[in-house]
Image (cartoon, rainbow, N blue to C red):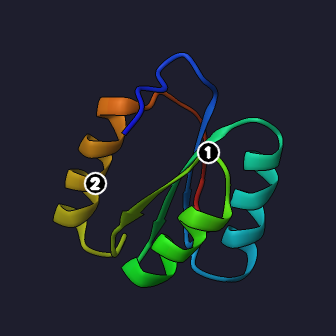
Amino acid sequence: MENVLGKKTCVITGVGWGTGNAIARKFASSGYSVAMLARRGDRLEQLESEIENAHAFPCDVTDTTALKETLKKITKDFRASVCCYS
């Protein structure tokens, strides 16, 4: 993964469908790197290929342990400017 520490980043949960998906697309089209979280890894991979500057992080945010590990991964390459919990 490209190091994007200098770029504006938005971390978004619930990106698989609906509001979270729309938010991810809007931030990406505005020049942000987007760290996308959702339960369905297959859906995230599809979205990652559709949305420029998007990065998939499969995670069930109701699983505290999994969420902590995922956030550790994200913060290795990203410095979040915005977080959206959808």
Amino acid marked by disc 1: Asn
In the visual, does 70 lie left or right of 35? Answer: left
Q: Quadrant of residue 76?
A: top left
Question: Which structural element holds mark 2?
Answer: helix
Rendering coords of residue 77 (x, y %):
36, 31
Q: Which residue is mark 1?
A: 53
Identity of the residue drawn at 66% across and 66% down: 50
Amino acid marked by disc 2: Thr
Identity of the residue drawn at 16% across and 63% down: 65
Disc number for residue 80:
none
Whether residue 11 is visible, yes or no, is: yes
In the visual, does 80 lie left or right of 8? Answer: left
Rendering coords of residue 49 (x, y %):
57, 65
Of badges 2 and 1, the one in the foreground is 1
In the visual, does 28 lie left or right of 83? Answer: right
Q: Which residue is mark 2?
A: 70
Q: Quadrant of residue 2?
A: top left
In the visual, does 81 lie left or right of 36? Answer: right
Q: Residue furthest top?
A: 6
Label 2 packing within 10 angstroms: few (<14), some (14-19), many (20+): some
Rendering coords of residue 5 (x, y %):
47, 21
Label 1 packing within 10 angstroms: few (<14), some (14-19), many (20+): many
Q: Which mark sits nearer the N-terminus, 2 or 1?
A: 1
Identity of the residue drawn at 59% across and 70% down: 47
Could you tell me which quadrant the C terminus lies in? bottom right
Q: Is residue 6 above or below residue 24?
A: above
